[in-house]
Amino acid sequence: MKVLVVDDSRTARHILSAALRECVPEPLEIVEACDGREGVSRYLESRPDLVFMDLTMPVMDGYEAVSVLLENDPDARVIVLSADVQPLAKSRILELGALVFAEKPIEVERLRELLEEVAPTQKLL
Amino acid sequence: MGEFSDDDLDALTETANVAMGRAGAALHEVLGAFVKLSIPEVFPVAVVDVPAAIGKLVTERGDVSATTQSFSGLVTGEVVAVFGETPWKALAAMIGYDPAPGEQGRQGFLLEMATVLTGACLKSLATQLRGELFPTAAALLCQDVPFDRFLERLPASKTENGVRALVLGVKFHVHAEHFGCDLIFVLAERSLETLRSTLARMGSNR
């Protein structure tokens, strides 16, 4: 499985990558990007099975990145992980086409649940 | 004091990001409007440079009002909340806040907003750092003063160079209501080693 992690925080990328290694069976390839624009670019290069996207980022935020990703690939599978937990942030990003919205910081158990949520139809696990 | 590495500062920025997110959600709950958050800025400075560092973080350059609040516990510091020319009566009506007339009402409103933001931030910071943080009551630092006078009101340290502090800043903005607030945390030097070792412990547990 190939996963793209888009977050401007190295710490957040590190936490999520470590959690993914606990939850996802090998082979697992993790590609990282530090803002929305780089995320879109990495997505188009590597065509991952799943994207984890932050919302508040420099250069291009998560809202725009999700829109651009889905314009380019309507089948892109995006889980949003954000510290911005306002209901409107969640509804906006889900309207844009993200599969799931989850709050930071993510714990391993919550990540496992998220992957199970998207797995039955998305064949990720 | 050990120096903060880039990784320490990145970890702290992410910790602040989560805390500011909770504060934004608390403000949203109070105002019922979407709150746009900025990316937190976190950097160490010499204590004597703290007022200048705060000045650089504040967006507003016209008249400002500001509150200040201390906190203690796992780490110790001060929070400064800086507001521009707030349409406070409309905002007070939105939240059902019944203000006293005149200046007293405006002051009460600013203190209320600062308390909501700071309280939510500190609660999240404490949870993430697995400790406790206890805020004092917010107090008015200045009201509707030119930016330069606000800077003069910030407590200046007479400490010699070499003593350091850590500054964390984020901006909250409610577009529809033209309401903005800069929330700036200053952590005292005596807390920095605790913070650094806590971050290191959190990192090793990840």
Image: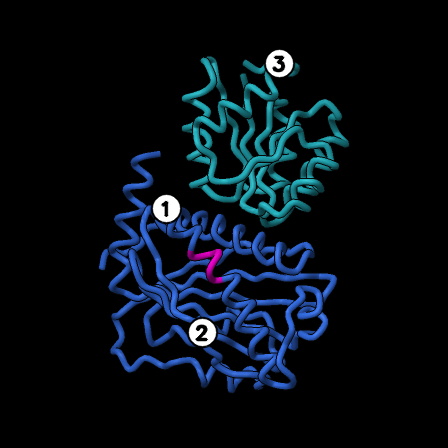
Residue B68: mark: 2
Main secondary structure found in the magenta portion: helix
Magenta residues, start to end: B118-122
Please tell me whether mark 3 sits on a helix, a strand or a loop: helix
Tag of residue B7 = 1
Which amino acid does the dot numbered 3 rest on? Pro
Element on which disc 1 rests: helix
**Chain letter matching colour blue:** B
To which chain does the residue with label 1 belong? B
Q: Which mark is residue B92?
A: none
The answer to which of B74 and B96 lies nearer the viewer is B96
Q: Residue at x 66, y 28 (%)?
A: A99
Q: Dot 2 surroundings within 10 Å: few (below 14), some, or many (20 or more)?
A: many
A63 to B3, vertically: above or below: above
In the picture, one chain is cyan; tell me its letter.
Answer: A
Magenta segment includes B120: yes
Q: Where does the image place residue B117, in percent across and percent down from the top left?
A: 52, 61
Is B51 magenta? The answer is: no
Category of crowding for the residue at label 3, using alpha-carbon neighbours closer than 10 angstroms: few (below 14), some (14–19), many (at least 20) = few
Q: Secondary structure at mark 2?
A: strand
Towards the viewer: B125 or B193: B125
At label 2, the amino acid type is: Thr
Mark positioned earlier in the residue sequence (1 or 2)? 1
Q: Residue at x 51, y 54 (%)?
A: B20
The numbered disc on residue A120 is: 3
